Amino acid sequence: MYWRLSGSGFQNKKGSANRRSFKRIVESGARPGVLAYCGAEPVGWCAVEPRESYPRLARSRILEPVDDRPVWSVTCLFVKRGFRTRGISVGLLKTAVEQARSRGARIVEGYPVEPRSGTMPDAFAWTGLASAFLKAGFEEVARRSPTRPIMRRVVRPAAARRRNRL
């Protein structure tokens, strides 16, 4: 809910109120992202929706739009401890791109972090790491902060992909 609310709105609903709000979004039939499972256990999450779904992005100087092209945004990437460093983040990103493509996206954008020293506490990597985005086929298109690249992956529409396979 962080990207969906103002700073005070997020703080005022911190905890169970934000969880309830997000549950209502999911129960409405929206598909706000993708999950990764190991057997029946959920082990990862990647949020992806049109950029307009995340009003806080509109207020960010560092993450302001690169151009006027419509994009879908990856705003959160989480892998459960014990399942990290297994490529799950890359798989989640690729699946998120496919979900966005199937819903009409032409560009999927992410806002990962790139640690200066090579490592960073997990709590600060909740938007993903630049290295995972690169492995998932994203390219850096802008950088307004030393540790915060804006990464994009351009995708062909679903119909064009099917035609090219024939």
Image (spheres, helix red, strand yellow):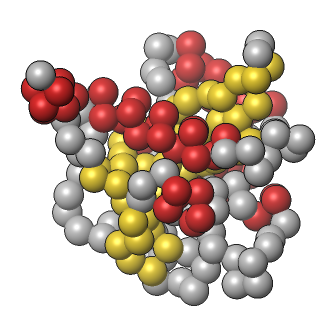
Q: Nearer the viewer, residue 78 or 17?
A: 78
Is residue 109 among what the camera can see?
no
The quarter in which the N terminus is drawn is: top right
Q: Residue furthest right?
A: 82
Q: Position of residue 83 (x, y in %)?
A: 82, 40
Q: Residue furthest front?
A: 166
The quarter in which the C terminus is drawn is: top left
The residue depicted at 67 percent of the width and 41 percent of the height is 88
- Relative side of 122 to 100, left or right: right
- Relative side of 158 to 133, left or right: left
Q: Position of residue 155 (x, y in %)?
A: 26, 45
The residue depicted at 48 percent of the width and 34 percent of the height is 95
Q: Residue 82, relative to residue 102: is it above or below? A: below
Q: Quadrant of residue 43?
A: top right
Q: Position of residue 7 (x, y in %)?
A: 64, 58
The residue depicted at 84 percent of the width and 66 percent of the height is 121
Q: Position of residue 79 (x, y in %)?
A: 74, 42
Q: Nearer the viewer, residue 88 or 58?
A: 88
Q: Residue 166, relative to residue 4: is it above or below? A: above
Q: Quadrant of residue 69?
A: bottom left
Q: Nearer the viewer, residue 160 or 102?
A: 160
Q: Residue 91, relative to residue 166: is it above or below? A: below
Q: Nearer the viewer, residue 57 or 88?
A: 88
